[in-house]
Amino acid sequence: MVHIEDKEFIRGKVPMTKQEVRCISIAKLDLKEDSVLIDVGAGSGSVGIEAANFMPKGKVFGIEVNPDGIEVIRQNLEKFNTANYELVEGLAPVDIPDICVDRMFIGGSKGNLETILEWFLCHSGDNAKVVINTITLESLSDAVKGLEKLKFCEIEVININIARNKKIGRYNMMMGENPIYIISAKRSK
Amino acid sequence: MVHIEDKEFIRGKVPMTKQEVRCISIAKLDLKEDSVLIDVGAGSGSVGIEAANFMPKGKVFGIEVNPDGIEVIRQNLEKFNTANYELVEGLAPVDIPDICVDRMFIGGSKGNLETILEWFLCHSGDNAKVVINTITLESLSDAVKGLEKLKFCEIEVININIARNKKIGRYNMMMGENPIYIISAKRSK
Amino acid sequence: MVHIEDKEFIRGKVPMTKQEVRCISIAKLDLKEDSVLIDVGAGSGSVGIEAANFMPKGKVFGIEVNPDGIEVIRQNLEKFNTANYELVEGLAPVDIPDICVDRMFIGGSKGNLETILEWFLCHSGDNAKVVINTITLESLSDAVKGLEKLKFCEIEVININIARNKKIGRYNMMMGENPIYIISAKRSK
Amino acid sequence: MVHIEDKEFIRGKVPMTKQEVRCISIAKLDLKEDSVLIDVGAGSGSVGIEAANFMPKGKVFGIEVNPDGIEVIRQNLEKFNTANYELVEGLAPVDIPDICVDRMFIGGSKGNLETILEWFLCHSGDNAKVVINTITLESLSDAVKGLEKLKFCEIEVININIARNKKIGRYNMMMGENPIYIISAKRSK
C-alpha cells in the first residue's frame, strides 16, 4: 500500500490535508526513491508519511511546533510504521537541523515563508523542488512573490475546487470543500 | 433598490438561495416588466421577491408547502412591501391555481419535476422560460432529461462554484460553498 | 428588458464580462435608481450599459482608453439606446472629469488601481461602493491591500468558477471557464 | 521515478488525463503491489502506465479501440519501458480477454458502461475497486445509476475544478480547465 486513504490517518484535533490535495502535492514534488524531503508545518504528518512510501531509500524530516500536531504525528508514524521519517519539534527555519534536502513541502509557514524559502536555497542543490499549500490570499501572494524574488523557476499555481457527494435518501448532494492553492517551483541552478 | 442583499431577508430555519445564485437565476429568467412568474418551492421567498422588483407591471406566484417556509415568505413579503406577489400554500403542480405564466423558477420540486414541467407547457405560451436550481445529481439528470423529453430548447446547464473570503487575523481564507447547478431553457413554439 | 443576454451585445475583438459575472457585479454594486456610477476600463461597455437599466434617474460614466473598446461601446450605446451613459475616452484616474459618484466598477485598471481607489475616496460620499473584477493573482492582491490600506470596509472577495454545458451528440460536456475574482467594498464614513 | 509529469508523455492527437486528475484517480484505485488493473478506454495510456509504477508485481491491461490511441500507447510503453502492461486492441467488454482483475479504471466506455461494470463483477473478487472519469452529465448519471443498480458500495463522486496560472508579463492569470467527475466504488462481497 503506497497511497493512504484519509480515514486511515489518526487526526485528533489537527487539520489534515485531504487525499486529493495530498496526492497532487506529492505528485508535484516529483519524488525520487532516494529523495530527502522536509515537510514544514507537518500538521498531522499525512503528507510526509504518505510521501515516505514513495522514497524507500530516502528520508523525510517533518517539522511541527504545535503540541497536538506533534502527538498526532507520533501516533501516525507508529501506526504506519514509517521508518524513514524524523520528527523535528520546533519552528522553521530556526529549528531545522543542518541537513541537505532536495524536496520541500510547506503546509504551514507561521508567517516565515520567505526565510523558509531562503533556508531551502542554502540547503539544497540544482533542480530541488518545493511545493506549498495554502488557503489564504495573503500566503498565496507571499508565496508567488517570494518564489519570484528568490529566482525560483517553473512556478506553477493551481487552485483546486472539489465538491463531493453526500447521500441523502436517494439523492447525491454535491458538497463544496474549501479551495486550496497548490504552488510548486524548482530552484534555479 | 432593486437588488436585495442576503442579510436583508428574514430566513428563519429555511434554506435561502444566496445572492450570487439568485441574481444569476433571475438574469436567466429574462423578466419583462409585465411578466407572470411562478416560483415553485419558494423557500424563503427570496428569488420571487427580488424578481418582483424587476417586473413592476407583472406578478409573481410563489408556491410552497413547508409551514416554516410559508411563515418566512409572509414575513419577507411584509418587510419588502411586495405588492405583486401571491403566496400559494401547497404542492406543485396540483395546488397551483389556473393561471397563465410566461416564466417559471423551480427551487424545489419534491420529486415532481416532470409533471411541473408539463404543467408549465399547458399554462404558458411561446418563448416562455424556465430556470431550475439544484444541488443534487439526480435532480440535475431529471431536469435535463425532462426538458429534452418535453422538447424545450436552448437548454443551458451551468455549475457554479463560489469561494468567499473569511477574515482570520490579517489573513483572508477562501471558504468553499456548495456548487449549484442552474438549468435554464425556453419552451419550443 | 432590464437584464441583457451576452449574445445581444456587440463585441468586436474586445473581451466581455459574461452574464453571470456581470449580474453578480451589478448586484454587488447595490445600485439606487439615482446612482452615479463610474465604470473604469469599460471594455465593451456591457457592465455599465446593463447597470444603466437599473438606475433610470442616475448616470453612468464609462472610461476606456482602447480604441477598439471605445468603438464597441459606441455601437452598444446606440444599439441599446442607453441615454444615461457618458463615454470618456482616456485613462483612469487622470482623464476622469471632475464628477461626484456613489458607485465605481473597475473591470481594468492598467496598473493604477491604488490611485483609482484614491480618486474614488475624493469623489464620493458615505456608503459609496466599489466592485472590482480581476482574473490575475497580482491584481487580486493589489485590490485587497489597496482597499485595506485606504480603510474601505466590508471587503468581500469571491472567486467564481463556472462550467457550462456544450452538447456533443447526446452528451452534455461541462466546459470550464476562467475563474473570476469579484472584490467589493464600501468606503468608510 | 514513480510519478510522471504530463510533458513526459507522448500525446499525438489523443486527449490525455492531466496529472492532477490522473494522480487522484490512481490514489482512489488504492493499488497494491500485485494488483491486476484493467484500464478501459486507455487513451494515451497515461493512467495505466503511471499506475504500473505502483504495482511492480502486478499487471495492467489497457484496452483501446482508437488506432491513434493504440499507436500513442505503444510509443509511451516503449518510452517508459513499462514491462507489466499488456495492450488489448478492441472494445470493452467484448474484446477483453478472459482475465481476473481486482482494479478497473474507466476513462471512456463508448456507451457500454453498464456491461463493462457487469463484466467487472464477473471477473473480480471481494473488495475490487473501480474508478471512472467523465466530463459529461449523461455518463455521470449512467455511472452513478449503474453502480447503484449493481450494488457497488462506498460510491463516491467528486467534481474537481482546477484553475492554473499563465504568466502574462508580470501577471499570473488563472485559467480554468474543464471540470472532471471522478467516481469511485467498491464491489460488494
Image (tube, coloured by chain):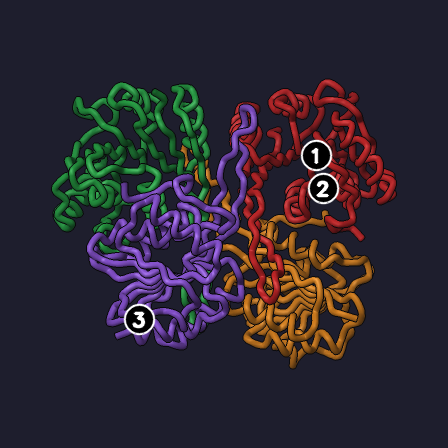
Chain colours: A orange, B green, C purple, D red
Q: Is residue B1 left or right of residue A170?
A: left
Q: Is residue B188 above or below residue A13?
A: above
Residue of label 3 = C187
Query: What residue appears at the point 17 percent right and 32 percent down from the top-left corner?
Result: B89
Q: Which residue is mark 2?
A: D31
Residue B81 seen from this side:
yes
Query: Above or below — where is C108 with respect to A167?
Result: below
**CA distance for labels 1 and 3:** 58 Å
Foreground mark, 1 or 3, reads 3
Does any portion of residue B163 appear in the rendered image?
Answer: no
Residue at position x 71%, y 57% from top? A51
Q: Which is more toward the observer, A78 or D88?
A: D88
Picture disc at residue D103: 1
Question: Does residue C108 lie above or below D49 as drawn?
Answer: below
State which quarter of the image contains the C terminus of chain A: bottom right
Q: Nearer the viewer, residue D76 or B55?
A: B55
The residue tagged with tag 2: helix, strand or loop?
Answer: loop
Labelled pair 2, 1 in contact (Cβ < 8 Å): yes
Question: Viewer-proximal residue, B28 or C57?
Answer: C57
Give how far across and how far down residue A178 sits, in percent.
49, 55
Q: Amino acid at mark 3?
A: Arg
Tell me if B117 is positioned left or right of A60 in this view: left
- The residue type indicated by label 2 comes to Leu
Q: Quadrant of residue D100?
A: top right
- Residue D128's label in the rendered image is none
What's under tag 1, amino acid-wise? Arg
Q: Position of residue B134 (x, y in %)?
A: 39, 37
Q: Are marks 3 and 2 on the same chain?
A: no
